[in-house]
Image (cartoon, grey):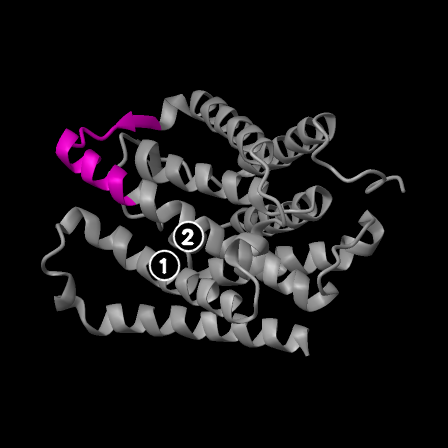
Amino acid sequence: MEKLRWAALMILSAMIFLIAQIAIVLNPEAADAVPLFLRGYLATHIPYLAAFITIAIGAHLMHSSIKNLISRKIRIGCIAIPAAIYALMLIAMDIIYSGSISPTDVSPWVFAVQAAAVIILTPMQAAAEEIFFRSIPLRIAYGERMPARLAESLPFIIFSGVFFLLPHLGNREVSASASILPLLYYFSWGALAAFLAIASEGFEATAAMHAVNNIHIALFVNYSSSSMMTEALFINSVLPSDIISIIAVYIVFAATFIALKRTGGIKEGFING
């Protein structure tokens, strides 16, 4: 019965997300009061906010909370360490792609307004995605108990990669690419995030990494054909889902796993048990 309730909440949050998206598309005049440079970002993120609120209310009605869907006990180290490692990886990638990155000359006022919206909404968007694509499906599959071993987790890890990929098929960078690399990028991100979340027994690490990634794109280095419609400080003419980006994702998740293991953030015997 509990698993059915989580499945119902998942379906409801997806419906609210779609209803919000449709309402925005059918009522473009509602955004007339919003500055033009902010409309694309808000139109993309308001459905996530609606889904986040739906999940929060639904979890409360089920005598749980949105905090418990992220972790039974929020650990600062499992937020700060992954966020710092991911930020360092993004800086390294910016250096590697420096030849294709150029300034946008965005005005300080526009950047400040965008920054306020991004800092408020992006963490909720990242948390909503982690909960919807991984936390709730994990509860539906395994109940309150997370898998104890990697072998037991593999079916869900593969499922999570596919499940995370599917809604990103409509992203502008996917349609703009002539290769399967963007598909492999999103599958890898989803699968590795599920692996790290199960290994660390919580979703605060992956939510932090997700938020850092999206904040970096929205404010600092956006790219051509991006689904994140903001005026960042810089623009990259190269899509971020080429083979170098995919390799970097595997490296950053491996580095995060090792760092969390050394600080006690990974359950004992997860891989070799």
Question: Residue at the front extreme?
Answer: 63
Query: Which is more toward the observer, 137 or 214?
Result: 137
Identified by mark 2, the residue type is Gln
Give the label on residue 101, or none.
none
Q: Is residue 165 visible?
A: no
* SS of the residue under disc 1: helix
Identified by mark 1, the residue type is Leu
Classify 266 as above or below 198. Answer: above
Which region shows up in magenta?
101-117
Give the label on residue 125, or none.
2
Classify 169 as above or below 264. Answer: below
Q: Is residue 257 left or right of residue 67?
A: right
Residue 152, horizontal then vertical, whole percent: 82, 55
* SS of the residue under disc 2: helix
Residue at 71 percent across and 66 percent down: it is 141
Residue 87, horizontal then vertical, whole percent: 48, 28
Instruction: Identify the residue position indicated by label 1 in the image.
Output: 49
Report the Cα–Cα distance between label 1 and label 2. Answer: 7 Å
